[in-house]
Each structure stands twice: as C-alpha cells, then as structure tokens.
Image: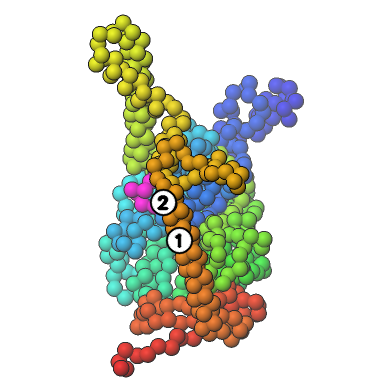
Amino acid sequence: MYLLSGRIYLCLCAATTSKSNPHFFHQPFSSPPFLPRFEREREMKIVTYNINGLRPRVAQYGSLLRLLNSLDADIICFQETKITRQDLSADLTMAEGYEAFVSCSRSSSKTRGGYSGVATFCRVTSAFSSQEVALPVTAEEGFTGLLEGPKISDKELPEFSIEVPLKIEGFEEVITKEEILKLDSEGRCVITDHGHFVLFNIYGPRAEAEDKERIRFKLLFFKILQKRWEFLLNLGKRVVVVGDFNIAPFAIDRCDADADFEKNMFRKWLRSLLRNSGGCFYDVFRSKHPERKGVYTCFSQRIGAEEFNYGSRIDHILIAGPCIHEDHEVEEYSIFDCHVTHCDILTEFKRGSSDTLSKWNGGRSTKLEGSDHIPVYVKLTDIPDLPVHSTPALAVRYLPEVRGWQQSIVSFLSKSQSLQQKEVALNLSSETSSELSSSQQNQGYTTARNQEKKEFFAKRKSPHSIKDTKRAKGSSSSQLTIKSFFKQPGEEPSFSSDQNFSDEVDICNSQDVICSKEKGNAALLEWQRIQERMKTSLPLCKGHREPCVARSVKKGGNIGRLFYVCARAQGPATNPEANCNHFQWASYKSKDKK
C-alpha cells in the first residue's frame, strides 16, 4: 500500500525479488510503490473494421481523428481503404496521438488498382522511447516476405522465407516466385509486432464461383498466409489475425444458408484452423458466443440487406499462442483463456436505423452514410508493458509520399505569407504616395498614378466591393426596383436610375419568364405521366402484387438483356415482408426476326 513506511516497503520489495522479476529495482526508491512501467499490466482493445473507403469515412466524421476516436480502441485495423501510394496524405493517414502503418495496392490493373488496401492505427502517448504495447516494435508490409522494406524479425526471430518454386496441396503445378509476389501486390496485409503478440491486419480476396483465376488467387493467398502463421507459432510467438476474410465459416454466420453452405472449400479451410477442428486458432467471437444467431458484420448495398438484417459474418478475430504469464505450471493455458475478456460486434455503427432507414424500393431515396460492414472488437487484459522502444521505420510518418505532402503545404503557406507581405508593402507605398501628393502638384502623372493605386487597394479592402459590382451589373437589367414593388396601385412604377430600356421590353421579358415557367411545368407534368405509365406497364411480383423494378444483365451471354425482380429489400425467406424472389425476363423480339 502507498501508506506503508519506507522500511516496510523495502521489505516487501526484497520479498518479491526473484528470477522471474529481475527488473523490480530498476525504479528509484523515491518513486511510489507501483510496479515499473514495463512490468505494469493493463487492458487493451483491438478493433477491426472494413470501412469501404477511407476517404468517405474521414469526410463522414469530419476528420481522421474523429473517426479513430469514435472507435475508442488502442489498435484500429481498417480494411478496404481504397487508396494508393499516390493518394497518401497527412489528412488521411496522420492523426494526433496515433501511429499508422499501411499497405496500398501496387497493382497496375484498372480493376484492382486502388480497390483494396489496409491500415493499422495505434493509439500511443509517445512515438519515441515508449513502453506501450500498442506501439509496435517492428512492422512489415505484406506477408510473403518478398516485398522490399522492413521485416518482422530480430536477433531471436529469423526472417520468414519461401523456397520457390513451391508445391502446395490443391495446386497441380508448382507456384512461381512471381505468382507469390503478386499476392502482396493488392495491399491486403500489414503486420505489426507488439512484443507479446504479432498482429495481422488482412483483407481477404473475393472470388465469384465462375472466376477460376480469382479462386486460385484467393486459395493461394490463404495458403501462404497460413504458412506465415505456422512459422511464427512454431517459434513460440502469439498470433492475432483480424480483418475481413470474405468467408463465413459456419451456417449460423449466414442468413438463409442452404444445406451445402459449409461444403465450400474456403469455409472448410477456415474451420480447419480452429481449435474445435484440431487447429491452433480460436474464433474469438464464436468462442465467446457459440449459440448467438442473427449477428452479422456485412450487408450488401445492392439489395437493401440492412432493412431485414440479411447479412453474413465475414469479419473475424482469430487468436493463437500461449499465455503471456510464465509463472504457472500448466502449459495448456492459452492467450485466449488467460487474456481475452470480451469480444462483440459494434452494432451502433450499422448504417441507418429503424427511425431513419428509408424503405427499399429497388433502391433508397437517400443514400445511407457509413460502411456496409460493422466493426468487431476484442478486449485483452493483463498485458504487461514492453521495454523502451520507438516507432518502427514502416510508419506513415516516415513515408516520403506523406512527408512530401506536408512539405508542399508548408511551402504553400510560406508563399502565401510572402504574397501577403508584398501586398502590405504595396499598401504602405500607396498611402505614402498619397501623403506626398500634396507637395507634388506639378507632377500630374505621379498624382494620377497614386490615385489609381489608392482606388485599387480600397476596392480590395472593401468587403462590399463585390456586392456593389454585382448590384451595378444587376441595375443594368430591365427589372423593377424593390421600392416600386411596394408602391400603391395608382402610382407609376419607378425604375433604377440608370434604366436604359423601355416599358415594352420589360413586359416582353416578364412574358418570356412566364412562358419558360409554363414550359417547365408542362415538362414536369409530362414526365410524371410517363412515370405513371411505366408503373402500370411493369409486371407485378408474385408475392406482393406490387410493381417490379427493371434490371439488366451485366455480363455473360445475356449481357444487356432486361429482366424484372421484386422491388422489396432482401430478407429471410420466412419473412413475408421481405423480397419474394420474383424474377422474369422482359419480352423482346429476336434480332433475327424481321
């Protein structure tokens, strides 16, 4: 206790000194009887969030700092940032009290460039000489170990390397170095080593059933990633994996999953990693809430999925490795058993609400703000502080793109300041010239020149100059003055002093305005009549007998062909208020027929 005398405190210190705690006396005796900073244990919160574009989320919250503070976490992992290295700027990546580590798309493909991207933000009190676990010791972009740059390694931890060509189960041909390097080209992973654990922030690829190339890419992505995890776990490291996997492992994690849902190859792979299937990882959310249903993290924007909670749980937090404490004899204790206290989904970040959510009718009348994903968080407890360390070299603060952007802003402000100084100097010279003009009556040219300067700067200083200019322009028109509008019926209307047009012109202009308004109203009425005819011509859905919405095929053999579907939002099949899944092709005449 703090009230203990110095002598008793010294005895307590001596009693607690042991091989397991050799640093206890590193703190001066004069300090309060607390554990040294790197021996303290504290709680830590980690959040993963697919933000569906960093720029729109920053704009939604007003600043990056407000966005980060809204999540209130020590480590925040974003996916699908949708920024390239050329887009990096301080307003998107730097916030007071946070250190950022990013991976951007390097792909030259028009369809993949700037599409993905991940970013990890660490909340710290000091970027240098810190003992906080939130500030990583080292960091690495990508996970293959083939990208140039800093690596997750030290004297005790060797670098991860892949021998190529590589043979992997499930692939007929060998994997080349170029194919492995391509896995890191889309900016889908950034790794931060926080001493007690290594954190992977990942954005798993999406692959449509018919896209064999992307299916191969996705499978290879997770296979190589698994090798990296196993490499670290075999070295005794603890591994935390967070992010959007684009995989829902169990039928309970998908609304209206069919009987074959869990037979998908990627779902099988993800389940094989988990402890209940013989793997090393805990699915933290499902381990904490094994029976909870109807809890999803992603809702499709194309079908109004939020309205009826029609989503899937594809954003995960996996954790593996031993307990951080070393003073127990049971080796089976894991980091999950000893240190994970809470894990849940932050439903308050779900787009819209029951009060503000407009009904889906083939689309929404107002666009919903926010991502189509919901953040997931985990809380760890009893996490000791680390020895003194500083921000790793991969941090955004050291990137030339961001530093160059900051320097350009500084230079811009310097240029603006110099321009202001020049303007002040000109003002002073003009005022001095006007004072001296009385003694220079014989120098007519100089006097006129000074007068021109004086008038020029007077116009620039006057806040009404622009308004006066606009008023002057407006006065040359044929409109009546406001004063004349309020005159009694018997009085003649008065025009502005510089009126140059006749009454006949005024009358004609007024009639033109009325005619144009009538034409506009007629066009609006005609468009409304067309819309009503379109509604009556649309087929009715079979479930609700309501007008369908028209869609067109985007790819394949029927590209461009029209079809009709139910206009309501997608939802569970058991909900009669949800989409009835009505579908029918639009009738059309074949081009071959004449």
Taking the image as shown, residue 288 lies to the left or right of residue 418, namely: right
Callouts 1 and 2 close, C-beta under 8 Å: no
Quadrant position of the C terminus in the picture: bottom left
Q: What mark, if any, has residue 505 been given in the picture?
A: 2
Element under disc 1: helix
Element under disc 2: helix
- Between 506 and 308, the one lying in front of the other is 506
Residue 298 seen from this side = yes
Q: What mark, if any, has residue 223 been given in the picture?
A: none
Is the residue 462 above or below the residue 369 in the image? above
Badge 1 amino acid: Ser
Q: Which residue is mark 1?
A: 516
Taking the image as shown, residue 371 lies to the left or right of residue 82, namely: right
Q: CA gap, disc 1 to disc 2?
A: 16 Å
Q: Which residues are magenta?
A: 83-89
Q: Residue furthest bottom?
A: 593
